[in-house]
Image (cartoon, rainbow, N blue to C red):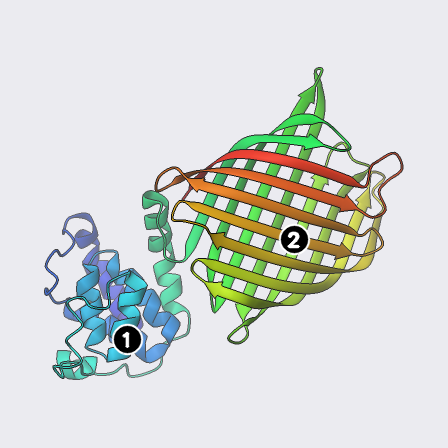
């Protein structure tokens, strides 16, 4: 309750500061007492609330001042805040531990600990709108990343044509919870007639389940106006294993049993059990160049395997050029269709 009152006071009294007051420039300038109390209350609640409070306060205050206030709670909180805000370990806060300046927020600021625990996730809900607005304007976010793609798609195999492609994707980095979603649409005309009209969507909600393991829910949807079906969908729940989890190298193996739904053009729907096996590999070759390799196999009555390679080169802070190659193999294709089909994508990517 006390934290709720603090946030309410910040909302009522701090609005002019968002519009008029400049962000603090001096590293040593202390935070207002209300923000110190907010940070201490978040620390007493949970690690997630503490990190959300750090991000929320940094919207209007100097990051060094926020990290300094966190260090007054304890050394670990100060280090976590510096890492979260991208401040160097050897910065102006490095000497606090040796000088014995680290103490609890209640001792340094004269503020008492919260009278009752804070509801988990409260700060996340309070900070989300501001953080999302800031990320959309600046194109920068500590947790969320979005992509908009526009480009050309060249198909070969069952069809040889050039399509126009647009796509949107959003991702929340896995930190206890993670989320990925993507939408794609391809369209083309051949001799004045529609040659492709295809829409696909996919989403995955994932949660850490140990140092290397994760649990997730996954869904896919595909609609092709020129195919023999109305739509196909796949819903599954499974587990993932992180073989590598480093900033420059990541590799995750996943397995997910589920169900595959197919609705034909007549409106009849069939549901079959299925198992999806996948491998997601990412390598930051150099600062501007990133390579990814995504392999998946869907085992069901109509099994298929898919391999996607992508090479992306940064063209600045928010723009990049992506070259992709995808090969799909249908083990039991429809009559008159080939087993294998490939496609090449050249797209311009805008990060947000």
Residue labelled with disc 2: 295
CA separation in Å, label 1 and label 2: 39 Å
Q: Please identify the quadrant where the C terminus is shown.
A: top left
* Residue 254, quarter of picture: bottom right
Q: Quadrant of residue 301?
A: bottom right
Residue positioned most to the front:
285
Q: Position of residue 96 (x, y in %)?
A: 15, 77
The number of callouts visible is 2
**Residue in the picture at 68% in, 21% down:** 189
Can you say whether 247 is above or below 121 in the image?
A: above
SS for callout 1 = helix
Label drawn at residue 77: 1
Q: Return the x and y of residue 166 as percentages of the image width and height.
A: 55, 34
Q: Residues within 10 Å of mark 1 (few under 14, many from 20)?
A: many
Please state the horizontal and vertical placement of residue 269, each as a whole percent of the image.
83, 49
Q: Residue at x 48, y 59 (%)?
A: 249
């Amino acid at each position: 309750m006390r934290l709720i009152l603090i946030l309410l006071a910040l909302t009522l009294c701090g609005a002019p500061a968002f519009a008029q007051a400049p962000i603090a420039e001096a590293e040593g300038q202390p935070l207002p007492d209300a923000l110190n109390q907010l940070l201490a209350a978040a620390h007493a609640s949970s690690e997630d609330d503490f990190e959300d409070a750090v991000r929320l306060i940094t919207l209007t205050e100097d990051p060094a001042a926020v990290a300094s206030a966190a260090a007054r709670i304890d050394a670990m909180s100060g280090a976590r805040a510096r890492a979260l805000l991208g401040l160097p370990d050897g910065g102006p806060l490095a000497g606090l531990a040796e000088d014995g300046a680290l103490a609890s927020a209640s001792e340094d600021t004269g503020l008492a600990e919260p009278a009752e625990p804070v509801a988990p996730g409260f700060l996340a809900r309070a900070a989300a709108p501001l953080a999302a607005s800031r990320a959309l304007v600046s194109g920068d976010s500590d947790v969320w990343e979005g992509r908009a793609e526009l480009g050309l798609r060249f198909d070969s195999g069952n069809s040889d044509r050039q399509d126009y492609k647009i796509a949107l994707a959003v991702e929340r980095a896995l930190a206890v919870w993670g989320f990925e979603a993507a939408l794609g649409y391809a369209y083309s005309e051949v001799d004045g007639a529609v040659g492709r009209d295809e829409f696909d969507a996919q989403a995955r909600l994932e949660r850490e389940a140990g140092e290397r393991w994760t649990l997730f829910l996954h869904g896919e949807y595909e609609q092709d106006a020129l195919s023999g079906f109305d739509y196909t969908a796949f819903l599954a729940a499974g587990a993932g294993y992180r073989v590598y989890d480093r900033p420059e190298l990541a590799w995750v193996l996943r397995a997910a049993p589920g169900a595959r739904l197919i609705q034909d053009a007549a409106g009849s729907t069939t549901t079959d059990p299925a198992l999806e096996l996948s491998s997601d590999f990412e390598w930051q070759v150099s600062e501007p160049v990133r390579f990814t390799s995504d392999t998946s196999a869907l085992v069901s009555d109509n099994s298929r395997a898919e391999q996607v390679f992508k090479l992306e080169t940064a063209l600045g802070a928010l723009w990049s050029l992506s070259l992709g190659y995808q090969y799909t193999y249908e083990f039991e294709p429809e009559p008159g269709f080939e087993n294998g089909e490939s496609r090449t994508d050249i797209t311009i990517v805008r990060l947000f």
